[in-house]
Image: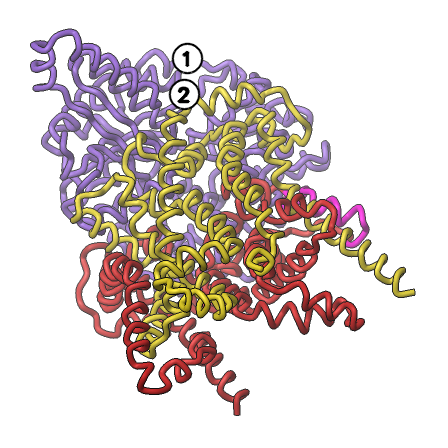
């Protein structure tokens, strides 16, 4: 994902020729000035906490009684079956949920970008609604929908899709289905906003021209909309990936990681290690950096694929 | 032939959107229904309107100093949003428009920083706020969130659609870089700012964990913290919680409804 | 809650305005005590009541009770203790008994020992034990989690069962009752939350056992009580007299709506049940059942409960200790009041001689419930919760689906034992 960002520029063009050296210097100065406020704030509020947590990840002990443990926490990771479960659940959620959600968001955004669509404002607001719904109310409601005698079972029974009520939250498979549905429900409208905003930057005349040429709707979507939205699609893919790797709210509220740790995520495990179990802040920090490494590895894979394509 | 096909497509679109809208609104509708019922009825799963609405609203208003709570929430979310949009859009624009290898490395590092779970940074951040002696203040809540990597990243990606011809033309007209940003880029990128306003306001308004840690007294609590507090205890009053939940949802929803209109004005159309 | 504080604030401000000379005197002695706890109607309300009594002697002092959701309060407290900054910490904090040792051992020096101020022989011994580390006791013992079996008298009567059928029974007798009820009326006896381990905790402590022994060693594999508890749990599920629920709301909603007929829980559940006034006279309380064929198994157990702790960094430390010692440590009349108003069963032994404890409760069909709970309280076996109860719980809950689906109990115990040992190394 980093690779994508780096390659789409045209640095050489701007540096061409000696006469342009003044321009280049001004570009350099402006480049720093524009990002300076952000860098200063990040330097204060991110760098120190990150260094502290890195240092903590080499500490072992209980609560505030800790001492330097070298790679003890990393060794503990490899021998911790609960960590392995949390890691594989998180990766499963990532692989299944993110593509479904982004596809849905893109389709909704494209349908709702139609200026001739009646009730556009209503549909947009409705689909956006889930991500502002208060978490407290959301967990009460979702649990009652997926209770043994809840509406989900009643509807499926009435439609004769199932013969016996499904034990949604106490069955490992169905609990995962509920969690994936819940995240998709909550975040699809959120991602849709980015696409809707980006679609305003596409020149409508391109669509008109394609329409006159008889290009069908799906082809216009696939060959015009998607490529034009590529930077924002990349943005949502990266942030949704990070968001899912840090998934906490849904599992904490709906399943508490159960049943059988089937929905335990890395973030929930970090929470347990820091605040529910005997506090091991050092080990919790180590698990946190697993998420960072995962993002790093995913970036690297993306970089290698992008390089291959270019050859 | 193709006309009837288009008609079917149209019908399917409406069907899909209606279904999605129903699924999205249903829990919200349930929440509204909940505000009219007593806690015992909600726990027992009653799904018809009741007569406890006024009672629930009065209990909610008496639970905390709600005027003060709303002031806290609006101040934190409002100020936080304005500062975040300014700092993050400047940075996103800066990273995209003025490029250097070194800054690209910084940007890559920032994306990795974005992936560190906040739980790992919370304790040292609290230590820092304590050493600045700003525990239990608005600035302690607002400051760490202003340079949001997420929003910087968003602005950078959105800036890729900002036509370089516009910038060149502005330069020829003699505008300085900061003038280009404020007088050309900002108006042209209206829909991007609209989306970012919604997202950042919502994030600040709903922010829970950090305000929980850094705010200490009832006088400083935000609406999100208050709604969470309402759920405390063995016998939480769900009627009152539903009133609180609706109150906590409305501001973001109104902002969304007002700003989504921006999404129909084409950016280039506005420039031409 | 806040209205209390603001009212006091206002009267303080009024006093200040009344005359500057008065103000200077008031300012010299007035102090605000800050307390963190997690239930506005229960522990928060009892704290307010206690302080209003203290105020009779100290009219200038005020209290600020800050309520949080329990998990949120624990997270906030831990993050702050870990940061080493005492800025903004309260004077007094409420801690659940299961977690007491974890806090005391994780954050040494954070809490104030109270031995020289409190006569601990006047409190229930098992509560004192929980808060003692290296000979120092840190808590003012508050509410007990003595367990009871709460049941709908009217609905059980339909199947022909009365209060006498529920006295001093075993879990297997309860299973038989549940089966008869299901045959006679088609109703389900108990809701169970498969993501919790409350039932296992109750069963273990009822026989004086826990996941750990007094020295903190893991006692899971080879523990006959643990095995009996899991087997009983498996039989309960297999008998078809339970229905799964998820989370607190659905759980309490199940038995307060009549979907299920009973539950067993700590005494603090009375407030939740009494929140349904239309069911007055339809509830009864029996002792929780005991394990079959286990040595030392009894009908008294504990679930939850909490105590007050003074922070060493407290700005008003002396006042906090004095307040706890004078009201919470000796005011018998105060304990009558919170029993009646909040249903809070304190741990001060002398309190049970008071009037309110003797009274019967019409809501519970005229049973002398408080007297009963006090009697059971005295029989609760003391166990060492240690510092890893949450880790052990997580390991048990991870195996609940295996237990429910009829898995081999020995294999399940081996798996739990292995996970607990790995997690607590």
Q: Does residue C244 lie above or below B56 as drawn?
A: below
Residue A154 in magenta? yes
> Which one is earlier in the sequence, the residue at label 2 or at label 1?
1
Residue depicted at x 54% and y 87%: A309
Q: Is residue B202 left or right of residue B178?
A: right
Residue depicted at x 51% and y 84%: A305
Q: Colour of chain B?
A: yellow
Residue at the spot of label 2: C370
Q: Are marks 2 and 1 in contact (CB under 8 Å)?
A: yes
Q: Does residue C391 lie above or below C337 as drawn?
A: below
Q: Colour of chain A?
A: red
Q: Tell me the tag on residue C359.
A: 1
- Helix, strand, or loop for circle 1? loop
- What x and y, as percent, mark residue C219? 35, 56
What's the chain of the residue with tag 1?
Answer: C
- What x and y, as percent, mark residue C364? 52, 19
Mark 1: few/some/many CA within 10 Å (<14, 14-19, 20+): some
Q: Colour of chain C?
A: purple
Q: Where does the magenta region start and end? A: A145-161
């Amino acid at each position: 994902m980093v690779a994508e960002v780096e390659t789409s520029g045209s640095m050489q063009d701007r540096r061409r020729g000696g006469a342009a050296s003044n321009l280049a210097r001004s570009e350099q100065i402006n480049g720093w000035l524009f990002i300076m406020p952000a860098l200063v704030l990040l330097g204060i509020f991110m760098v120190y906490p990150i260094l502290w947590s890195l240092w903590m990840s080499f500490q072992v002990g209980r609560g505030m009684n800790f001492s330097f443990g070298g790679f003890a926490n990393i060794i503990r990771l490899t021998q911790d079956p609960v960590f392995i479960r949390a890691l594989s659940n998180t990766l499963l959620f990532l692989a299944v949920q993110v593509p479904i959600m982004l596809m849905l968001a893109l389709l909704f955004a494209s349908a709702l970008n139609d200026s001739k669509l009646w009730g556009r404002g209503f549909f947009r607001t409705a689909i956006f609604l889930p991500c502002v719904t208060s978490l407290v109310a959301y967990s009460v409601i979702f649990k009652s929908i997926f209770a043994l005698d809840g509406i989900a079972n009643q509807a499926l029974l009435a439609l004769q899709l199932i013969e016996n009520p499904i034990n949604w939250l106490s069955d490992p498979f169905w609990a995962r289905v509920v969690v994936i549905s819940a995240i998709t429900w909550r975040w699809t409208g959120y991602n849709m906003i980015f696409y809707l905003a980006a679609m305003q930057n596409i020149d409508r005349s391109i669509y008109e021209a394609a329409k006159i040429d008889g290009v069908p709707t799906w082809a216009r979507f696939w060959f015009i909309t998607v490529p034009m939205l590529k930077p924002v699609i990349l943005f949502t893919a990266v942030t949704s990936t990070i968001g899912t790797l840090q998934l906490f709210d849904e599992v904490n509220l709906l399943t508490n990681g159960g049943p059988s740790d089937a929905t335990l995520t890395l973030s929930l495990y970090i929470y347990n290690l820091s605040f529910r179990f005997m506090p091991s802040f050092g080990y919790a920090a180590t698990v946190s950096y697993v998420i960072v490494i995962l993002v790093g590895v995913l970036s690297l894979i993306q970089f290698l694929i992008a390089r291959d394509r270019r050859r | 032939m193709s006309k009837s096909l288009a008609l079917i497509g149209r019908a399917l679109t409406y069907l899909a959107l209606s279904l999605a809208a129903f699924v999205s609104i249903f829990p919200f509708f349930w929440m509204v229904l909940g505000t009219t019922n007593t806690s015992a009825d909600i726990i027992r799963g009653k799904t018809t309107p009741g007569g406890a609405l006024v009672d629930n609203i009065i209990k909610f208003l008496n639970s905390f100093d709600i005027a003060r709570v709303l002031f806290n929430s609006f101040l934190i979310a409002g100020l936080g949003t304005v500062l975040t949009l300014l700092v993050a859009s400047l940075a996103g624009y800066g990273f995209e428009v003025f490029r250097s290898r070194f800054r690209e490395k910084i940007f890559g590092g920032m994306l990795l920083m974005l992936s560190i779970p906040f739980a790992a940074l919370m304790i040292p951040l609290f230590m820092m706020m304590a050493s600045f002696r700003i525990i239990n203040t608005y600035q302690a809540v607002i400051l760490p969130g202003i340079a949001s990597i997420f929003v910087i990243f968003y602005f950078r990606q959105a800036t890729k659609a900002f036509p370089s011809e516009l910038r060149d033309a502005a330069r020829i007209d003699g505008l300085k870089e900061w003038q280009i940003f404020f007088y050309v880029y900002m108006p042209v990128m209206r829909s991007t700012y609209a989306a970012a306003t919604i997202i950042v306001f919502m994030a600040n308004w709903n922010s829970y964990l950090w305000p929980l840690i850094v705010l200490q007294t009832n006088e400083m609590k935000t609406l999100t913290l208050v709604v969470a507090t309402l759920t405390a205890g063995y016998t939480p009053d769900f009627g009152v919680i539903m009133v609180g939940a609706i109150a906590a949802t409305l501001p973001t929803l109104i902002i969304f409804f007002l700003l989504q209109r921006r999404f129909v004005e084409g950016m280039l159309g506005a420039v031409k | 809650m806040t209205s209390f504080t603001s009212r006091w604030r206002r009267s303080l401000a009024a006093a200040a305005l009344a005359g500057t000379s008065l103000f200077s005197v008031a300012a010299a002695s007035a102090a605000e005590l800050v307390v963190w706890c997690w239930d506005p109607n229960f522990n928060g309300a009892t704290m307010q009541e206690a302080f209003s009594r203290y105020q009779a002697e100290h009219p200038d002092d005020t209290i600020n009770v800050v309520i949080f959701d329990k998990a949120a309060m624990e997270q906030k407290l831990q993050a702050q203790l870990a940061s080493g900054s005492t800025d903004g910490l309260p004077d007094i904090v409420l801690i659940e008994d299961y977690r007491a040792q974890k806090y005391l051992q994780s954050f040494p020096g954070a809490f104030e020992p109270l031995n020289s101020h409190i006569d601990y022989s006047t409190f229930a011994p098992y509560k004192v034990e929980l808060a003692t580390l290296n000979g120092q006791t840190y808590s003012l013992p508050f509410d007990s989690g003595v367990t009871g079996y709460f049941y709908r008298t009217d609905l059980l009567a339909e199947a022909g069962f009365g209060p006498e059928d529920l006295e001093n029974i075993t879990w297997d007798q309860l299973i038989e009752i549940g089966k008869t009820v299901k045959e006679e009326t088609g109703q389900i006896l108990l809701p169970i939350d498969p993501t919790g381990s409350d039932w296992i905790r109750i069963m273990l402590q009822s026989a004086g056992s826990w996941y750990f022994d007094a020295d903190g060693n893991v006692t899971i594999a080879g523990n006959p009580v643990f095995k009996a508890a899991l087997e009983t749990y498996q039989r309960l599920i297999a008998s078809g007299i339970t229905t799964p629920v998820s989370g607190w709301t659905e759980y309490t909603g199940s038995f307060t709506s009549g979907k299920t007929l009973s539950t067993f829980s700590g005494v603090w559940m009375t407030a939740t049940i009494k929140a349904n006034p239309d069911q007055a006279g339809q509830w009864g309380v029996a002792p929780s059942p005991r394990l079959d064929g286990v040595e030392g198994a009894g009908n008294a157990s504990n679930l939850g409960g909490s105590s007050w702790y003074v922070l060493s960094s407290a700005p008003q430390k002396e006042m906090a200790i004095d307040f706890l010692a004078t009201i919470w440590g000796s005011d018998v009349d105060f304990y009558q009041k919170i029993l009646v108003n909040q249903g809070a069963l304190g741990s001060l032994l002398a309190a049970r001689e008071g009037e309110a404890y003797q009274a019967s409760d019409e809501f519970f069909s005229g049973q002398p419930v408080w007297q009963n709970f006090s009697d059971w309280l005295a029989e609760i076996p003391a166990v060492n919760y240690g510092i890893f109860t949450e880790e052990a719980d997580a390991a048990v809950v991870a195996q609940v689906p295996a237990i429910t689906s009829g898995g081999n109990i020995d294999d399940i115990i081996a798996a739990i034992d292995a996970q607990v040992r790995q997690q607590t190394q």
